[in-house]
Image: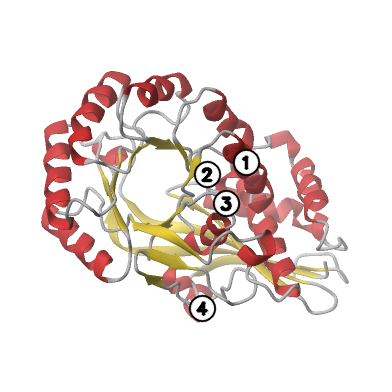
Amino acid sequence: MEWIRVSSVALPLATPISDAKVFTGRQRPMTEVAMLFVELRTRDGAEGIGFSYSKRAGGPAQYAHLKEIAHELLGEDSSDIGRVYDKLLWAGASVGRAGVATQAIAAIDIALWDLKAKRAALPLAKLLGAYRNSVRTYNTSGGFLHSSLEEVTANATQSLENGIGGIKIKVGHPDSARDLARVAAVREAIGADVPLMVDANQQWDRATAMRVGRALEDFDLTWIEEPLDAYDAAGHARLTAALVTPVASGEMLTSVAEHCTLIDADAVDILQPDAPRIGGITPFLRLATLAHHHGLALAPHFAMQIHLHLAAAYPTETWAEHFEWLDPLFTQRLETRDGRMLVPNRPGLGIELSEQARRWTVDSFELDAVTSTAA
C-alpha cells in the first residue's frame, strides 16, 4: 500500500432525528452523522474507498485511532486483507477489540475489499459470490418518532411508490398506546400485504416488551426490532420463544463475539449486524457464516452502500435497510424497483465521494510510503 487518506466528515441532517432513546431522556435528537472515510492507493494505481460512521458521539475518537495506527498499512500487500486486519487490530489492542477501535479499522478493511473487487472488475457482491442481483428493501428514515403520524404515513406511501418493498417505523414511546395507534394507522395506510416492521431502539423492559409484543401480533409484523437492551440475551431469548412475531437485534453490537452471545442463546430470529460497527467486511463474513449455520435470517443495519453487497452474498433471502441520509456523500445512487434494491454493476462498492462530501470534511490526513509521515 503506497498512499492513504483518512477524512472525518460531518454529515448534517435536514431535521433533528428522534427515536425512543430521545423520548426516554437517554439521548438528544441527532443532528448529524460523523463519517470516517478511508481512501487507498497501491503502487500500480489501484484504488479503494471505505467508510465507518458514528451517531451523536465517537466520530472524533474513531478518527484519532486511525491517526495513530494507519501507518501500519503502508507497504502491505492490499490482497492480504485478513493479515492486515489482524495487524491493525493488534496495533491498538490495548483499547480492546470492539467499539471505537474496530469501528475505525472497519473503514480500512472495507476500502481493501472495495479495492480487491475493483482489481477483479467486479461488484463486491459478485466477488464474494452473490446469490442474487437484488435484495428486498425496506425504508426506515421516514418513520422516526419526531415525525407526525401524517408525515409517517405520507413517507411510507412515497417509499412504496419509489419501489421500496417494506416500511419500518419507530416505537418505544413512553405511552405504549401511542405506539399501537401509530402502528395501526400505518398498517391501514399501506395495506395488509406490505411488510411492516417496528423498532423500539432498546427502550422497553422485559415486561413491557412482552405485553406490547403480544399486542403487536394483531398487525402481522415482519419483525420487532431491538425490543430490549442489546446485551440482554436472556431477555431476548424469552421474548423470541414467546412471540409469534420474529424478533430482530444486533445493530448496536461491536464485535463478532458479542453477536455470538445472541446466537448461542437462541435470542433472535433475525440478526442485524452492521459491518462498520463490528470491524468491517472481514469480521462480517465470519459472522454471516455463523448466522447461516444457525438458520438465522439476516438484515444488516444502515450503510446500504455496503450492506447491499453483503446481503446479496448471504445464502438465504435477506433485507437491506434504505436510508437516503448518506446519498449526498456520493456521486451515485442505488436503485430500487419492485420492492428490491438492485446491486450496481459498477466495480467494488460502486461509490465515489461527492464534492459535497469534500466540503463537509472537518479534518483529514494523508500518509505515503515515501515519507511515511502525515502530509
SS assignment at label 4: loop
User: Based on the displayed image, in which of its 4 quarters is residue 6 positioned?
Assistant: bottom right
Disc on the earlier residue, 3 or 2: 2
Number of callouts: 4
Nearest to the eye among marks 1 and 4: give it.
1
Mark 3 element type:
loop
Position of 161 compared to 34: left or right?
A: left
Provide the secondary structure element on which disc 2 rests: loop
Distance from the alpha carbon under mark 1 to that under mark 3: 11 Å
Asked if the residues shown at circle 2 and circle 1 are in contact, with their CB atoms under 8 angstroms apart, the answer is yes
Q: Nearer the viewer, residue 139 or 230?
A: 139
Which circle, 4 or 3, is nearer the viewer? 3
Residue 334 shown left or right of residue 68 in the figure: left
Q: Residue at x 56, y 52 (%)?
A: 60
Q: Nearer the viewer, residue 309 or 110?
A: 309
Residue underneath mark 2: 273
Q: In the rendered structure, are the residues bearing label 3 and label 2 in contact, judged by CB atoms less than 8 Å apart?
A: no
Q: Earlier in the sequence, mark 1 or mark 3?
A: 1
- Residue on which disc 1 sits: 287
Asked if residue 216 lies left or right of residue 64, the reply is: left
The image quadrant of residue 120 is: bottom right
Q: Which mark is residue 354?
A: 4
Q: Nearer the viewer, residue 326 or 71?
A: 326
Tell me the tag on residue 314. Answer: 3
Mark earlier in primary sequence (4, 2): 2
